[in-house]
Amino acid sequence: MTMSKRIFSSIVLSAAILALFCVGASAQTYGSYTPYSIFAVGDLASPGTAYNKSMAGVGIAGRSHRFLNPLNPAAVTARDSLAFMADFSLLQDNKIFRQGDLRSGSNTMNMSGAMISFPIWRSSAMMLGIQPYSDTGYGYGYSFTDPNIIGQAGNVAYTATGKGSIYQIFASAGVTFWRRLSIGAEFIYHFGKIEKTFTETFSNSSYNGASNGHTLQLTAPAGKFGVQYEQPMGARSSMIIGATYKTAANLKGNVTSYRFSTGTAASDTLYFKSGAPDVSLASEIGVGLSYRYGDKLMVEADYTRSDWRGRGIDTREGFTGNLSTGAGLSSFAASVCEAYRLGVEFVPARNDIRYYYRKIAYRAGVYWKNDYYTLDNNKINAYGITLGATLPVFPGYNGITIGMDFGQRGSMKDNMIRETYVNFSIGFNLFDIWFQKHQYQ
């Protein structure tokens, strides 16, 4: 295949992957499903590709010329200088919810990222991609049991539903100096739509039902900066320290809040308001430290922190979960979001010519994090373990990455909901040489 045909086929393949991601994302009813996504901008997506997820989400100090790492824009330069690379990932989410004696479950599947990377000039490179930022998905209901209400108004039912996602398109570029210091910058554009609806219905036709809800059409530009420094520690090992900073993002667009009554008695608009969100996404800092021994072992630890207090998510209509707070509803307040992650990768013998299983990259990780808000002054913590592997597909660094995430979020105290989940991720790592000169035609 000539160089021009190879480049063209690579670009077409990447465009198809990105288009498939967008079509699949728009077709999904729920990108994720959890009652906790009723608040703010929903459930924040787990970071990175299937490669990152299989190691608990680390990547701030990770550098690999075999895999794309979107967690630090400085890592884009860790690559073959002649290579074109792409990654496409899927996430399958399984949850069991428990609140008191009540139990339920959910299963969803969604695309979790698509990205491409290519060299620019010498030690510089670029990456383009799209991935979820947050997902909203919930649906529940209950009936009023107070005999005083039922005796006068008949059966009364309440239901709540929500769906939608915020995605982020990003373009990052990085450059390496003196073969040790890498810096990168990234432009991020958030966009998406979230719909939340709450209804009350009466079996007695002489009473009107009520429906209130919010439609959030949101956009927000942001930036991210990263640095990595690699210090050799002998002939085959090295230590890498990395850091990232993502800027805050002021949400633009429109938030519509409404309440109206419907029924045989009469129909009327009780409340309607439309305007700017007046809310911002929090900035985030991250630091990481990794140790690598040749092409055999890699260990990394990351820490991230973002402060959501004062961003408006707990005071603005459309973000607080219902039209108004109080009246027996949970007290929702913005908080500080923190995460600790530890991941390890081990390859028995990358170049073994006899046994395929020795070429496989095996991974594991553990993490602990807390959400960006509290309920009734209770923090929403999550912890879990991850397992995964990359099955090499020759030639080059092509591979299929599979990962599993076993964890738990929340607790059952104060009538809260506990989530137990098992998530499966799969990623397709594509690799191709662009500018290789052939000796023979």
Image (cartoon, helix red, strand yellow):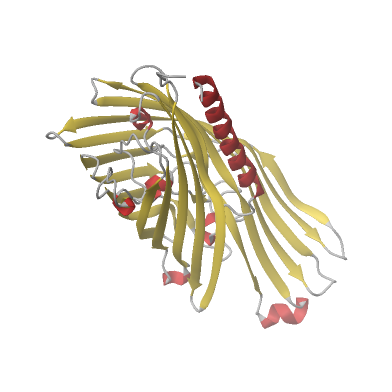
> Would residue 119 appear left or right of 91 to someone viewing this image?
left
Question: Would residue 187 be visible to someone looking at this image?
Answer: no
Q: Is residue 364 above or below residue 418?
A: above
Task: Tell which residue pokes out farthest to the top in this image.
Answer: 121
Image coords of residue 20 (percent x, y): 61, 41
Instruction: Residue at 34%, 32% (x, y): give it.
Output: 75
Image coords of residue 425 (percent x, y): 46, 53
Q: Nearer the viewer, residue 242 or 411?
A: 242
Task: Tell which residue pokes out farthest to the left in this image.
Answer: 234
Instruction: Residue at 42%, 44% (x, y): give it.
Output: 393
Q: Nearer the viewer, residue 440 or 155?
A: 440
Q: Is residue 356 above or below residue 87?
A: below
Q: Nearer the viewer, residue 182 or 317?
A: 182
Q: Give the number of marks.
A: 0
Q: Is residue 56 above or below residue 66?
A: below
Instruction: Residue at 11%, 34% (x, y): give it.
Output: 234
Task: Tell which residue pokes out farthest to the front in this image.
Answer: 440
Q: Is residue 34 above or below residue 20?
A: below
Q: Quadrant of residue 199?
A: bottom right
> Would residue 120 appear left or right of 200 to someone viewing this image?
left
Q: Quadrant of residue 141?
A: bottom right
Instruction: Residue at 24%, 23% (x, y): give it.
Output: 179
Q: Nearer the viewer, residue 232 or 371?
A: 232
Image coords of residue 411 (percent x, y): 41, 67
